[in-house]
Amino acid sequence: CCPGLVDRFQEVAKNGKLTKDAFDNYGKPTDRAKHRAKRAKRHDLGELRQLFDTIVKAGEKDIKLADLVRHKREVNRICPELITEFSDIDQDNSCSVSWDELRVFAGGTDDWLKFQLQNIIGLDGLKDQIHQFHQSISLDKKRQAAGFDVKDA
């Protein structure tokens, strides 16, 4: 949804304003990413947290590939995407997966957006606006799905 939006704001915005369509279409996920997100949402966060805590070595904060190999049977039973989508889940390309990265993978776009915005230093006002804008769009989509007429701004 928003990686690099702040850096590319001038390209995306028209006359210094970001339209709803430009925001909706910016960084639109591929069909593969949409399919992955639908699969990931089926996981219970409590069960994932339990799996995460089981896999992570004592004194470590992240899951490493070697950890997945040791716990392959349990991972395949509970969340096989942790193996098949490891590089996508690993947002910071550290070759490990933190709890936040796994939670974002299993959560929705709101969790993903919060995770991305927390990595930006400062710009709190802009981050609040982006978050409010995202919530507005999400609510509009729910209203449209419920059959209400929603006007584009």
Image (cartoon, rainbow, N blue to C red):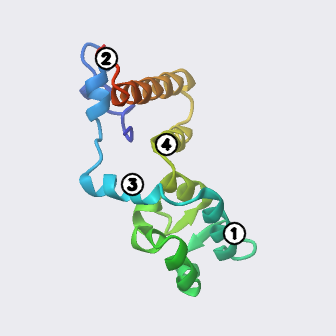
Q: What residue is rendered at 54% in x and 72% in y?
A: 78
* Residue placed most toward the observer, 57 or 149: 149
Q: Amino acid at mark 2?
A: Asp
Task: Choose the circle earlier in sequence order: 4 or 3.
Answer: 3
Q: What residue is rendered at 56% in x and 74% in y?
A: 64
Mark closer to the observer (3, 1) = 3
Label 2 sits on residue: 149
Q: CA distance from mark 4 to mark 3?
A: 20 Å
Q: CA distance from mark 1 to mark 4?
A: 23 Å
Circle 4 Cα neighbour tier, 10 Å, few/some/many (<14 / 14–19 / ≥20): some
Label 3 sits on residue: 38
Q: Amino acid at mark 4?
A: Gln
Q: CA distance from mark 2 to mark 3?
A: 26 Å
Q: Whole-percent x and y of residue 128?
A: 53, 24
Relative to 142, does residue 33 appear above or below in the rendering? below
Q: Whole-percent x and y of residue 107?
A: 51, 50
Q: CA distance from mark 2 to mark 4?
A: 31 Å
Task: Choose the circle earlier in sequence order: 2 or 1.
Answer: 1
Circle 3 Cα neighbour tier, 10 Å, few/some/many (<14 / 14–19 / ≥20): some
Label 1 sits on residue: 53
Q: Quadrant of residue 97?
A: bottom right
Q: Secondary structure at mark 2?
A: loop
Mark closer to the observer (2, 1) = 2
Residue 87 shown left or right of residue 59 in the figure: left
Q: Amino acid at mark 1?
A: Asp
Task: Choose the circle earlier in sequence order: 3 or 1.
Answer: 3
